[in-house]
Amino acid sequence: MPPGDPAGPAGPGVRHDLGTRQESLIAALLTGGKPPAGLDGQRVRAQAIAMVRKRARAVARARPELAAALGPSFGLLFREYAASTAGAAHTGGAAADCQAFARYLRADRHTMSRTARQALRRAALGRPPRYRKARTTNAAS
């Protein structure tokens, strides 16, 4: 028994039950499934929403030009994407999530501006963002 373990040694049945409850919690967080018994469903749903928002912020930080090009619709479009891919394995962090988000939008043929389409194409292909140089005026002349 590990030091400080008040539950004592965990047998195979206890481990299996814990594993089942953990899988149920993950499913509830990612796919909107029913949370395990004993957990507050409203809190689990709130946490699921927070996780999607966190992913959206990470994508917006990874590709600010994409978030800017999509404007106010970025959040809604990302939530749609996250719901459509619920339960899919997300590996590779924000960059991979951004690439998958861009591919989702391109495949879904959302109507958007030329700037947004260009940003989507670059993000879907994993190319670095393009930044335009700021125009400066020569006030000394």
Image: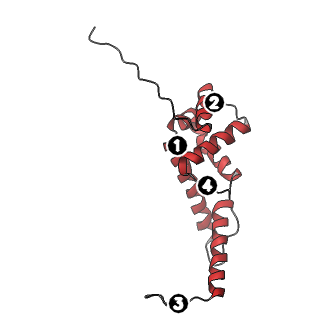
Q: CA distance from mark 2 to mark 4?
A: 24 Å
Amino acid type, residue under disc 2 in the picture: Arg
Amino acid type, residue under disc 1 in the picture: Ala
Mark 2 vs mark 3: which is more N-terminal? 3
Q: Which residue is mark 4?
A: 90
Q: Which residue is mark 1?
A: 60
When the figure is inspected, residue 121 is found, relative to residue 86, above or below; the finding is above
User: Please, what secondary structure does the residue beneath circle 2 have?
Assistant: helix
Mark 3 vs mark 1: which is more N-terminal? 3
Q: CA distance from mark 4 to mark 1?
A: 16 Å
3 and 1 marks in contact (CB < 8 Å): no
Quadrant, the C terminus: top left
Q: Nearer the viewer, mark 4 or mark 1?
A: 4
Residue at point 61%, 74% (across, down): 39
Residue at point 67%, 71% (across, down): 24
The x, y position of residue 131, in whole percent, is 47, 28
How many other residues sit within 10 Å of disc 3, few (<14), some (14-19) or many (≥20)? few
51 relative to 13 in the view: left or right: left
User: Please, what secondary structure does the residue beneath circle 1 have?
Assistant: helix
Residue at point 61%, 34% (across, down): 120
Q: Which residue is mark 3?
A: 7
Mark 2 vs mark 4: which is more N-terminal? 4
Q: Nearer the viewer, residue 84 or 19?
A: 19
Amino acid type, residue under disc 3 in the picture: Ala
User: Please, what secondary structure does the residue beneath circle 4 have?
Assistant: loop
4 and 1 marks in contact (CB < 8 Å): no
Mark 1 vs mark 2: which is more N-terminal? 1
